[in-house]
Every structure is written in C-alpha cells, then in structure tokens.
Amino acid sequence: MSERPPATVTPEELGPLDLAEKGRRGGQAISLDRRLFMKFTAFGRCADPHAAIAALTEDGVAGALYLDANDPQGIGVIVMSEDPDYFVTTLRALFNHRPFADFTHKTDLDMLGRTYSIGYEPDLEDTLFAKPRSKILNPEHRWAVWYPLQRAKKFETLPTDHQRRIFAEHASLGKRYGAGGHVADVRLACHGLDKNDNDFVVGLLGPALHPLSAVVQEMRRTEQTSQYLDSLGPFFVGKAAWQAKA
C-alpha cells in the first residue's frame, strides 16, 4: 500500500505559532503577547458580606464584590489577574477558607475569560489592561450585569464583510449608551474555558440599573443577537459593595 501524499503546508504554517494580541498604530501592525484573565464566582448563604470584603482586601485581591439583586444572601466576586495560575493557587486558597468556605458556591454562575484585541487597536496595553480594570474599579459603576453568551457556529461561516456589518451594529449601540456614561462594557473571550462551551463573557457596568437592562433589550433586535446567538446567560445582577483601589 502506498502512503497518502502529505497535505500542502504554507510557509506560515511551518513557522513559529504567533499567539500575541494584534493591533495597529500609524499604519503599522503591533502585537503584545499578554492579556488579563478574569474570574467571576457567585456565592449564596452570605448574610453579612463584611467578612468577605475584609478577606478580599487583606488578600490584596484586584476586583469587586457585588450584592446579588436576586438573592438576599447572595454575592458575586469578579477577580482579575494577568497570571492564570493565580486562580488555582492564591484565589483557590482564599475561597477554601472562611468566610468563603461557609458560603454556598453557585456553580451555574462561574465565568472565566480573557481580554482580547480585534486587530485595529492603537494601544494594546490600554485595551487589554487599563480600560477593563478602570471600568470594573470605577466607583461610579455601582451596578453590574455579568453573563456568558454562546455564538451560533454558523456565524463563523459568514463572509468577512457580513461579520463586520454585524459588529458595527453592536459597536454603534455600545457607543450610544457609553457616550452618556450610562453603560460601560467589559468583553472577555472564554473559548475552551467555559464548561458550557460559551464563547464570551460580558460585563455591563454603570451608575444605574435601568440602562443596563435597556441595552440588553435593545440588543435583542440586532442581527447578531436575534439570528446568531445560541444562548445568553445565566445573568448575575448586582450592586457593588466593594471595589479594590485602582
């Protein structure tokens, strides 16, 4: 029996794998092989969050704690770190000690994601680190809605121009709500990081709750949400009781 001929491989495929985030400045391509990871964890049976806040502060956690609007004893914690080892070492140890060990872990609200670039950003440090951190730690962003979403697989088969039009529709919506300071969004990729095969984690942050609900309502009418999403949620809705110092 003869062996099958090897598949044609391009020189690019034979070269070193480039996993850096890409941007563009002054007409030149730029890259940065760093990104910020974020972990959202929700707990129940937390009647008094002050002990949890004290533990987070003492441990030097970078993030925020929210009071769950849908559970009178619920809290949600968003934690940021460039090193993913942090979540399975330092943060794991923290969550396995009191007071967190006394709470009920809500596994259906677990979210883990990473910041990412689209390819045109002129300042990757700002896009991947400064902006998402400042949005989460902004004391004016008292309300938050965090949720995962799963994009329909057929979206990836759409022509590039069609995908760009869909992205532009969402970008326009975000600009309108962001211009008045109503909503700031944090978008994280979670491909292969989510047990339910979700693609993204989204955080909507702002000084009031109603605009966060309104932007989700308006998103329902966009092409991406109405035709190219397989699932949205579950949603965590909360108000900040603690934010780490910026």
Image: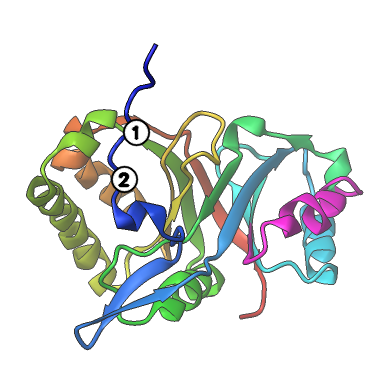
Tell me the residue at 27%/78% (across/down).
Answer: 24
Please rate how many residues cluster around mark 1, counting C-alpha atoms within 10 Å: few if below 14, some from 14 to 19, many from 20: few
Residue at image mark 1: 6
Query: Marks 2 and 1, how far apart in space?
Result: 8 Å
Q: Position of residue 171 (x, y in %)?
A: 20, 60
Residue 171, label in figure: none
Q: Position of residue 152 (x, y in %)?
A: 28, 30
What is the magenta range? Answer: 79-99
Residue lying at the far front of the rendered structure: 1
Residue 83 covered by magenta stretch: yes
Please rate how many residues cluster around mark 2, counting C-alpha atoms within 10 Å: few if below 14, some from 14 to 19, many from 20: few
Q: Nearer the viewer, mark 2 or mark 1?
A: 1
Q: Is residue 140 visible?
A: no
Circles 2 and 1 in contact, beta carbons < 8 Å:
yes
Residue 204 covered by magenta stretch: no
Residue at image mark 2: 9
Vertical placement of residue 57 versus 213, above or below? below
Q: Is residue 56 left or right of residue 10?
A: right
Q: Position of residue 73 (x, y in %)?
A: 71, 40
Q: Is residue 203 left or right of residue 155?
A: right
